[in-house]
Image: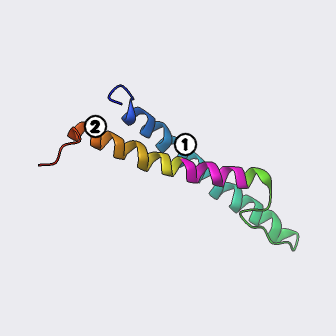
């Protein structure tokens, strides 16, 4: 367990979460603007790729929490004072 690079994995999850969140927001804004021109309403879960981006975003946020928690436990040594 000491050989796992939790900080690096947490950083990767952080980058993924950032870009996925930006992608979700931009896609929603663009699709909502298109929908407004065609008298249609757009939601976050209209298509499969939007759902996939949302699920991957949630998983990466959970990964951030888990990785940085494990990093803190490892750096502290798992001991209580």
Above-or-below relation of 2 to 56 = above
Label 2: which residue? 74
Q: Residues within 10 Å of mark 1 (few under 14, many from 20)?
A: some
Q: Residue furthest left?
A: 81
Magenta-colored stretch includes residue 55: yes
Look at 42% across and 50% down and name the residue there.
Answer: 65
Left or right of 72? Residue 58 is right
Judge by depth and name the residue closer to the eye, 71 or 78: 78
- The secondary element bearing badge 1 is classed as helix
Magenta segment, prevailing SS (helix, strand or loop):
helix
Q: Residue furthest right?
A: 38
Judge by depth and name the residue closer to the eye, 26 or 75: 75
Look at 28% across and 42% down and name the residue there.
Answer: 73
- The secondary element bearing badge 2 is classed as helix
Give, as a single range, the part of the protein colored magenta: 51-59
The x and y percentages for residue 2 are: 32, 29
Look at 24% across and 37% down and name the residue there.
Answer: 75
The x and y percentages for residue 23 are: 64, 50
- Where is residue 24, by image quadrant? bottom right
Look at 54% across and 42% down and name the residue there.
Answer: 16
């Amino acid at each position: 367990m000491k050989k796992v690079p939790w900080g690096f994995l947490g950083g990767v999850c952080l980058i993924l979460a950032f870009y996925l969140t930006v992608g979700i927001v931009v896609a929603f804004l663009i699709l909502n603007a298109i929908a407004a021109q065609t008298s249609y309403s757009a939601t976050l879960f209209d298509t499969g790729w939007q759902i996939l981006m949302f699920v991957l975003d949630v998983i990466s946020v959970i990964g951030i929490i888990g990785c940085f928690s494990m990093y803190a436990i490892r750096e502290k040594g798992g001991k209580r004072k």
